[in-house]
Image (spheres, rainbow, N blue to C red):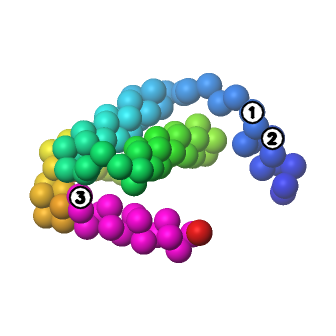
Amino acid sequence: MLNAKIEKDFSYHAPINDQPEIYQDLREAAKDMAYEIESVCPDCDEKKTAFMKLNEVVFWANASIARYGYVKYENSEKFRADKLCAYSEEFRAEKLIDEFIEAQEKEQ
């Protein structure tokens, strides 16, 4: 089992079918979130960390798709800026940032 995981994790996985479009959708959603963070968060170490972690989210999401494929649900809508903005309007970035900081403090 471990050898198979090593082979999968440390091998190149060329994009197949519509994976490049899925990667782009993930990057666009993350970009929308980055602009939201930029618009509401003060310039501080926490904001820098939020951007770093957002990059990490995109990296690991893309890695999961490259290694294991993706799930395509029938009748699903892509996660786009309008949904992100609707969520952020309801919950506001301050709450998300506070939860993020709490989670980071628990990890340390």
- Local secondary structure at mark 3: helix
Q: What residue sits right under mark 1 in the picture?
A: 11
Contact flag, marks 1 and 2 (Cβ < 8 Å): yes
Classed neighbour count for the residue bearing mark 2: other residues with Cα under 10 Å, few (<14), some (14–19), many (≥20) = few
| Residue placed most toward the observer, 101 or 67 | 101
Classed neighbour count for the residue bearing mark 3: other residues with Cα under 10 Å, few (<14), some (14–19), many (≥20) = some
Is 14 magenta? The answer is no
Q: Residue at x 51, y 45 (%)?
A: 56
- The residue lying furthest to the front in this view is 44
Q: Quadrant of the C terminus?
A: bottom right
Q: Residue at x 12, y 58 (%)?
A: 89
Q: What residue sits right under mark 2 in the picture?
A: 7
| Amino acid beneath label 3 | Ala
Q: Is residue 8 left or right of residue 68?
A: right
- Residue 20 occupies which quadrant of the picture? top left
Q: Is residue 32 left or right of residue 82?
A: right
| Residue placed most toward the observer, 66 or 101 | 101
Q: Report how far apart the C-alphas of labels 2 and 3 lie in the structure.
A: 39 Å
| Amino acid beneath label 2 | Glu
Q: How many marks?
A: 3
| Amino acid beneath label 1 | Ser
- Local secondary structure at mark 1: loop
92 w.r.t. 60: above or below = below
Classed neighbour count for the residue bearing mark 1: other residues with Cα under 10 Å, few (<14), some (14–19), many (≥20) = few
The residue segment tinted magenta is 93-107
Q: What residue sits right under mark 3 in the picture?
A: 93
